[in-house]
């Protein structure tokens, strides 16, 4: 006769991946990726090491799951939004603001810093970051720029140059905030009020197509 599993037990099992991810994130940020041991993550989540491996094959899998959760899922919300009514500048502003907000969160920013500092020891992280985070962001921004050009909202430009102009400063700002920022709190350039929004508006203004005056 099958063993009866009560509802609280089932709910507990369903919650375990979330608990393991939360524990891993806390330890990764606290100790660094290399120093955080699987047994410590399991203990923080209140389970055995064997239980951790039922859900995740390795620490790399845990970090990749966190990266996907914090970054790629948020981009997907805007990537699949059917909206012919919205202008391309509006779409671009919303997408970049969403991604910037995700990267600026203390925990998400900690993940980004981990990727950069640990990538030489765990090259799989770089491949995942490139293909699952950066490439979707590049394609989405580029697609919106092309849309804007085709609709006459943006002047003809190289979409990849726009991607660089918008995405690279976001990554630089994030890295500074979570790596250099705590040690240089009075950096007037990087800590300028509303730096991201002002930069975004500057780029958008340069993209706007304006018919020549008759």
Image (tube, grey):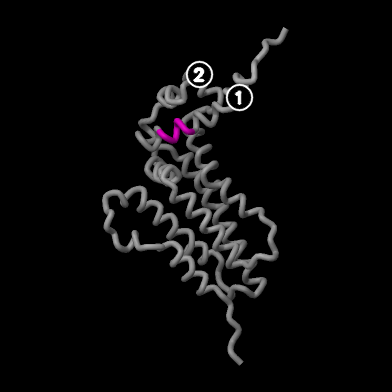
**Residue 192 falls left or right of residue 205:** left
Residue 145, horizontal then vertical, whole percent = 59, 66
Name the residue rendered at 56%, 48% in the picture.
74
Numbered badge on residue 50:
2
Tell whether 188 sits left or right of 127: left
Res 204 label:
none
**In percent of the image, x 50 and y 46: which residue is there?**
129
Q: Which residues are magenta?
A: 22-26
Look at the picture and state if 41 lies above or below 98: above
Question: Is residue 26 depicted above or below 128 in this figure?
Answer: above
Furthest residue in direction top, as rendered: 1
Q: Earlier in the sequence, mark 2 or mark 1?
A: 1
Q: Taken as a whole, is the magenta stretch helix, strand or loop?
A: helix
Q: Which is in the foreground here, disc 2 or disc 1? A: 1
The answer to the question of whether label 2 and label 1 lie on touching residues, with beta carbons closer than 8 A, is no
Q: Quadrant of the C terminus?
A: bottom right
């Amino acid at each position: 006769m099958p063993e009866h599993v009560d509802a609280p037990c089932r709910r507990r099992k369903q919650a375990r991946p979330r608990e393991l991810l939360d524990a891993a994130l806390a330890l990764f940020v606290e100790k660094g990726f290399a120093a955080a041991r699987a047994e410590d993550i399991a203990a923080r989540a209140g389970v055995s090491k064997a239980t951790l491996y039922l859900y995740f094959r390795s620490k790399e899998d845990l970090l990749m799951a966190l990266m996907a959760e914090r970054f790629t899922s948020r981009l997907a919300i805007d990537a699949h939004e059917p909206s012919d009514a919205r202008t391309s500048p509006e779409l671009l502003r919303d997408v970049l603001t969403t991604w910037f907000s995700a990267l600026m969160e203390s925990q998400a920013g900690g993940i980004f810093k981990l990727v950069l500092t640990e990538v030489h020891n765990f090259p799989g992280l770089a491949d995942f970051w490139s293909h699952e985070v950066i490439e979707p962001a590049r394609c989405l921004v580029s697609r919106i720029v092309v849309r804007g050009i085709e609709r006459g909202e943006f002047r003809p430009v190289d979409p990849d140059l726009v991607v660089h102009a918008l995405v690279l400063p976001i990554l630089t700002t994030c890295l500074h905030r979570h790596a250099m920022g705590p040690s240089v709190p009075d950096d007037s350039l990087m800590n300028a009020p509303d730096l991201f929004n002002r930069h975004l508006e500057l780029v958008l203004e340069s993209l706007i197509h304006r018919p020549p005056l008759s």
